[in-house]
Amino acid sequence: MPHPSASLIRHRAPAQPATDYDVVIIGAGSAGLSAALALGRCLRRVLICDGGPPRNAPSPGVQSFFTRDGIKPAELLQLGHQQLKPYDTVETRVARVTQVSAGAGQFELQAEGETGRQFTVTARKVLLATGVEDELPPVEGMRDLWGRGVLHCPYCHGWEVRGQPLAVYGRGKIVTGLALLVSRWATDVVVCTDGPGHLSNNARRRLRQQKIRLYEEPISHLEGKPNGELRHIVFENGEKLARHALFVHPHQHQRTNLAELLGCRLTSKGAVWINKHSQTSISGLYAAGDTTPGPQKAVLAAAEGTLAAIAIHEALTREECPK
Ligand SMILES: Cc1cc2nc3c(=O)[nH]c(=O)nc-3n(C[C@H](O)[C@H](O)[C@H](O)COP(=O)(O)OP(=O)(O)OC[C@H]3O[C@@H](n4cnc5c(N)ncnc54)[C@H](O)[C@@H]3O)c2cc1C
């Protein structure tokens, strides 16, 4: 059945090649939903594939999201889905995209729906909004407390743990920078390097200057409270250090290998490279949110989704209105 909005679309020769959708958005986090909203408002035929929970699912609240400070992650996305309802050219499917192939002016995507049913769709443009996955250090208890007692970002969570005894986990330059940052929110901050910290004399001096103590003893495990907050860091020598939260800057990798399979250029940190129009190194394939380089926050992902949507709509318009 034609979409009710179809009658509003200006009379133009049908877009070539004929595809099921103008755009398929892979990933329904802040980036994907925000892009879907902007493209829906452009009367674009959009499919958004919702393949699982967002990166911040273990967290009790999305902090520092303009007008939604502290909202539950699932509730934020539910609002995003709800606000797509008036845009009848936007379709959402719970499905994991398993393959994308680029052809002449179009993409073919294979996906697996909730019941395991496979389907194939075609689109003129594709937006990767698939996010990243954090690789936590292999310390017992770290994964269980992730998002409550073990935190990654003081901009997201520093305020909630302000004034409490805090720890920062890691080694070398990265832990020094993170500890100095975290010391903005608390006076009692320690660095735990879990073995030799590989800190320069200058780094040690900077930590000392801010009264940040250094523990280089290997960690045995983290002890948490039933609500997921941290209680103690337990060292292999048996010592227990009471802490309210521990910050860590984990390595991360792309949530899907779709960009890699397509041969997209990646940065040295594994992010999907994009140009200033949000386009990857593959023509017609765009990316937004944590998948791409730069700071990672929900509100930034949402903004990047909008930017990508504008770039996509303008590229489609150029194709539809040749010079
Ligand atoms: C513990 C934690 C707490 C955080 N707290 C905050 C906070 O308080 N404030 C803040 O601003 N930021 C916070 N962040 C960062 C925030 O979560 C991210 O910046 C934001 O989620 C990025 O949005 P995104 O849309 O790029 O990716 P995501 O939100 O991760 O969404 C990507 C979506 O793509 C889906 N997907 C992946 N592969 C496929 C596929 N093949 N097919 C279909 N779908 C697929 C995923 O299932 C997911 O739903 C936190 C992060 C973590 C880890």
Image (cartoon, helix red, strand yellow):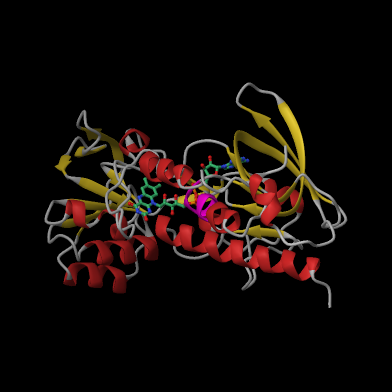
Q: Position of residue 144 (x, y in %)?
A: 33, 33
Quadrant into which the C terminus falls? bottom right
User: Magenta includes 72?
Assistant: no
As rendered, which of 206 and 9 lies closer to the eye? 9
Question: Residue 308, how many percent across, how many down?
Answer: 60, 63
Residue range (magenta): 29-34
Residue in view at x 33 percent, y 56 percent: 153
Q: In this view, does 9 lie to the left or right of 178?
A: right
Q: In this view, does 46 lie above or below 200?
A: above
Taking the image as shown, residue 316 lies to the left or right of residue 188, namely right
Residues 255 and 120: in front is: 120
Quarter holding the N terminus?
top right
Question: Of residues 257 and 323, which is closer to you in this image?
Answer: 323
Q: For residue 32: magenta?
A: yes
x then y, percent, for residue 63: 30, 53
**In this picture, residue 7 sits left or right of residue 270:** right
Q: Position of residue 263 (x, y in %)?
A: 75, 55
